[in-house]
Image (cartoon, rainbow, N blue to C red):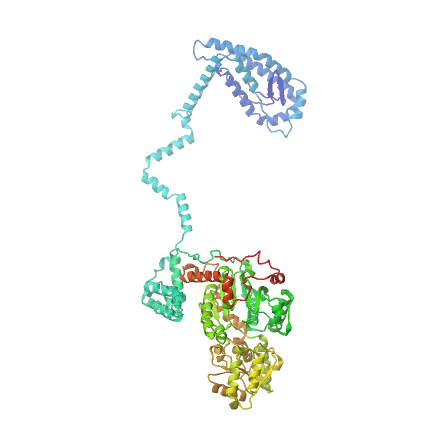
Amino acid sequence: MAKEIQSQSPPSSTANGITFSSSSSSSPSLSMMLSSTNAFSLLSKGWREVRDSADADLQLMRKRANSVKNLASTFDREIENFLNNSAMSAFPVVSSSSSSSAFGNEIGIMKKLEPKISEFRRVYSAPEISRKVMERWGPAKAKLGMDLSAIKKAIVSEMDLDEREGVLEMRRRRDRDRFREFYAEGEGEGSFGDWKPIRSLKSRFKEFEKRSSLELLIGFKNSELVEKLKASFQSLYKETDEAKDVPPLDVPELLASLVRQSEPFLDQIGVRKDLCDRVVENLYKCKSQHLWRLPSSQASDLVENDNHVDDLDMRIASVLQSTGHHYDGGFWTDFLKPETPESKRHVAIVTTASLPWMTGTAVNPLFRAAYLAKSAKQSVTLVVPWLCESDQELVYPNNLTFSSPEEQESYIRTWLEERIGFKADFKISFYPGKFSKERRSIFPAGDTSQFIPSKDADIAILEEPEHLNWYHHGKRWTDKFNHVVGIVHTNYLEYIKREKHGAIQAFFVNHVNNWVTRAYCDKVLRLSGATQDLPKSVICNVHGVNPKFLMIGEKIAEERSRGEQAFSKGAYFLGKMVWAKGYRELIDLMAKHKSDLGGFNLDVYGNGEDAVEVQRAAQKLDLNLNFLKGRDHADDALHKYKVFINPSISDVLCTATAEALAMGKFVVCADHPSNEFFRSFPNCLTYKTSEDFVNKVKEAMSKEPLPLTPEQMYNLSWEAATQRFMEYSDLDKILNDGDGGKRMRKSRSVPSFNEVIDGGLAFTHYVLTGNDFLRLCSGATPKTKDYDMQHCKDLKLVPPQAHKPVYGW
């Protein structure tokens, strides 16, 4: 084609079965000499170039819409020139025999196409073409194209088989020549080898061939990719300097650890825990001659710290941590311990009694919940037993009963706020309980742990853990909670020994108490040395007195400072009127030294099951005892008494004794482990013999008590008791662990033999308590394996048939 063609055509036009698509083209000059066998490829190439350049001419088509007819004429002339030039062309031949026939056939083909092209020109030059183009080709149209498939089919149909084979052969030769030209290595001007990217690629390959294998390896090692890969692997495992400096355990440490892990077995064969502790201490002291092997920081800590047990635990944990070992649980333990992602921890206090029953296990846990909730570090739930109305009539004083848990909760909160002076922000929850007349105690009905939601199962405080777990048939407390603390309130062995066949019963109860506390508690707090020596236990008084008693003591001290008579009455005794609460000791002492005490009179306040028998015994012996109805110790009628007498040796820690000291009175009590905490107070007078009892009573009646110092008042308060509880129960470490969980956990780092033993004991206990016959034989209240329908109605619970407690191992 000799000159540039610019054209604009309608969207589509059909003539003689050939379809054309609108296109606009601007093509370069074509060579006048084309190959005869290349006619079809020349047409295809020419029209492909026309189609590819159509997009560039769209803007020109919009601007020159008025010259459509001129452009159509120009296109007609160019087509005619194209046909004439094609007919006059000289065609190169493949062989001399086929040249003349090919030339004649090409001319024949063009003559057959001429009528079809003339028809196309006629339709294309019609006047309405301009209007159609303007309507169809607006700004929204994206692209033009020309469909030459009909022309291709017409040309191919006019060619015989030999002609088509000749064209294909020419195309194959052309493609081979172009392939050789593309990959030619010639350096002459115009060759493909001179192209800059190819020259760069060739030079790189030549350099690669010259370099040795060692140079390649070094280069790869120092590459940026390798450095990044090394950094990634190093971030996955970083061995700290402390881990590198931790030496392995030596023989004394291994022996000390073995003795500690074997404590449950040694305890069963008669080797006491204190003896095992001394053996561990002596073995660990052997470390002093090997301190040069430890890092300086660890050696100094070992010398300064006398807590050898904790040192040994941390030593074993550090060695295991340095080796990458981590212990996630044992055969009996629950692997899915609750997580505590929230910053605020949850404390659940579970007890065996509730107000309005004025007993220690109802009052003291209530105060503990209030003062623990006073801190913002933890949320607190107090879990107390709910009794059906028939049991309430047997337990609660003055025929006081409640129709719903909400009513009893309102009574409890009102009673508490009247005494502490602030609003306690804690939750009160109820679990089903049943009262046993024979045992004079409340026992849980069903699995108590299920009444604490799993989301709140973080820290559990079991008030009287042995009592709660004697017949516990449910999930293990230490599996559901992260930390379980038991607080022993009652000296059950002392009470049982007073019963018929008490020695035999006490023997079995002693081992059962060891069993259940070992299986269900992580730490046990004994209020005094009067309690049974239980596993995992320490002695600490974690009880305080009602703030109201301290206020009474301050008031009396002010009266005395003004010279007024603060105490106008003599001595009194207050307590539940049952023989085990000190009444037997009191009557024996008063009867034995009736003449020595002369005209000494004692007022006795109390109600109880043994009231008639106690009063009858006192009247029979003609003792100077004046029996009065039971009162609250903070009652105004008791403020003027100067001496409180408490001869009981069955108490663990007498709350009434602490309250009397807080009010500034003298206290005369036995020299007994239950009174060990009170000996530091100057107004506490202890006696060892009955004769000494008489002397202490006369001393108290003849003197005036000393006012309490601020320090002594604080030691009696619930603030101090809560602080002692946080320290001895390890809750201060747990609640104040603010290092994001990175603190070394001894119990989870060391695969403890104790945990295996405790888990086995818990599993055995679960199996035995699941048998109703064994429960009844051991003294369990009937139908306490699960709650009954009345509990379901009162607490809105699912019936027990539809809810079967499952032990989670």
Q: Is the N terminus in the top left, top right, bottom left or bottom right quadrant? A: top right
Q: Is residue 377 visible?
A: no
Q: Position of residue 299 (x, y in %)?
A: 36, 65
Q: Nearer the viewer, residue 744 or 576?
A: 576
Report which quarter residue 369 is drawn in: bottom right
Quadrant in the picture for residue 13: top right
Rendering coords of residue 200 (x, y %): 40, 32
Q: How many marks?
A: 0
Q: Is residue 289 visible?
A: yes
| Residue 507 against residue 188 in the figure, above or below | below
Q: Give whichever of 296, 124 is nearer the camera.
A: 296
Q: Residue 779: x and y, percent? A: 51, 68
Residue 727 location, x and y as percent? 48, 69
Q: Is residue 764 left or right of residue 655?
A: left
Q: Residue at x 56, y 24 (%)?
A: 51
| Camera-side residue of 207 and 43 | 43
Q: Is residue 528 positioned above or below 160 on the image?
A: below
On screen, residue 99 above or below 609: above
| Foreground pick, 42 / 662 | 662
Residue at the location (63% across, 30% down)?
140
